[in-house]
Image: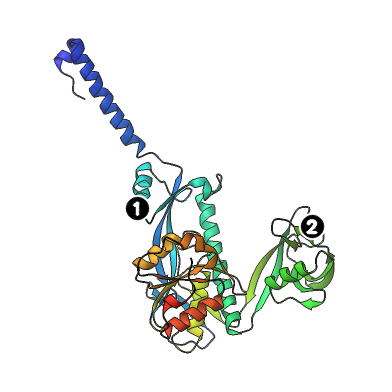
Amino acid sequence: MVFSKRDKAGARPRERRADLRTVSAVGALGLSMFSLVIPVDFVTESPGPTFNTIGEFDSKPLIEIEGAQTYPVSGNLDMTTVSVAGGPNTSLFAVGALATWLEDSTAVLPSDLIYAPSVTSEQVSAQNSADMTNSQEVAQAAALTQLGIDYTEILTVSGAVEGGPSQGILQEGDVVTALNGEPLASYTDLTARVNASAGQPVTLTVTRDGSEQDVTVTPSYNEQGQRYVLGLYIARSFEFPMTVNYGLEEVGGPSAGMMFALGIIDELTEGEMTGGIHFAGTGTIDADGTVGSIGGIEQKMRGAADAGATVFLAPADNCDEVVGNVPRRLNVIKVSTLDEAVDAVTRIGQGEDPATFPTCS
């Protein structure tokens, strides 16, 4: 600020008041501008890029299958993403939060609704990477289940709930192979049969330190889940008759599971399942084919539409967020299982009208 000689020597009272008002205005403007460039405790979610699971990424197949017969594919089965800024991931400034808040396709949320206060960016990245790896393995299991191809699921104890029914009975590293003398096919099989016990003691066959032994556990009732449980943390791994390689990095989370499974099924199935149509979608997947809900579906639908998709597969459990947010010219089909998703893609690929399939309402 430049001062005149009169300012220094002593201005008249009216001139002095005018100068003070000018200084106050400039100071307020400076504070307002400064407030826009300080970090804020918010997270923004906006449409991210899409990736064709039956296409290429960086000149390599996004899904490449070794050890099995594969077939030509066409069209798109896009997995969709959300671009996240703020929280422990990046520094978000007030000006950025304000700008994105004004965009229809962007959500601005308090950081503590998304992340625990103590979580670090490294922990977020590690968890997202682990979720992606797990979703890819489970997607392969779901695809092979859908196609009737055998594989082995291995259930390894990674811990016991403190004070739970299995504490002191099962140990970390135990591999659970049977319940009441009957082999276990999967984690879903284990949880269903434990719940069916209605709290009666069950005998688990486990492999521990290379030898097999039986242990007895009495399941307890979990009020929150409304089912009987063993109080165990189970790590799931798989032995497949083929290898599936995924050529995608820098993307994390579990929500691409259903689209990965569809891509694997299309490549392992004779005929071009999509009929050349541009599909996109989202949803977690379990080995039994159950499709689960995800976050950011409004942003994912917008990203899919921007990428040229005409049909979007949405988890039925996300329907309350779908209604009222569907972009123009995008047909949304709700699915609860992988079987429903395969059926919709196949029939639409053969020429059926997407508008005739179940949607969110």
User: Where residue 81 appears, x then y in whole percent?
Assistant: 44, 63
Per the model, the C-alpha gap separating discs 1 and 2 is 51 Å
Closest to the camera, between mark 1 and mark 2, is: 1
- Please indicate whether residue 15 sits to the left or right of residue 287 in the image: left
Taking depth in this image into account, of 67 and 356 the one nearest to the observer is 356
Label 2 is placed on what type of residue? Gln
Residue 192 picture quarter: bottom right
Task: Please give the residue where the numbered disc 2 appears in the rendered image.
Answer: 167
Between disc 1 and disc 2, whose residue precedes?
1
Label 1 is placed on what type of residue? Glu
Task: Please give the residue where the numbered disc 1 appears in the rendered image.
Answer: 103
For the point 71% across and 73% down, the residue is 189
Secondary structure beneath dot 2 equals loop
Residue 339 picture quarter: bottom right
Secondary structure beneath dot 1 equals loop
Give the vertical position of 102 relative to 227 (above or below). Answer: above
User: Where residue 115 appears, x then y in whole percent?
Assistant: 53, 49
User: Where residue 48 appears, x then y in whole percent?
Assistant: 40, 61
Give the vertical position of 229 relative to 286 (above or below). Answer: above
Are dots 1 and 2 in contact, CB under 8 Å?
no
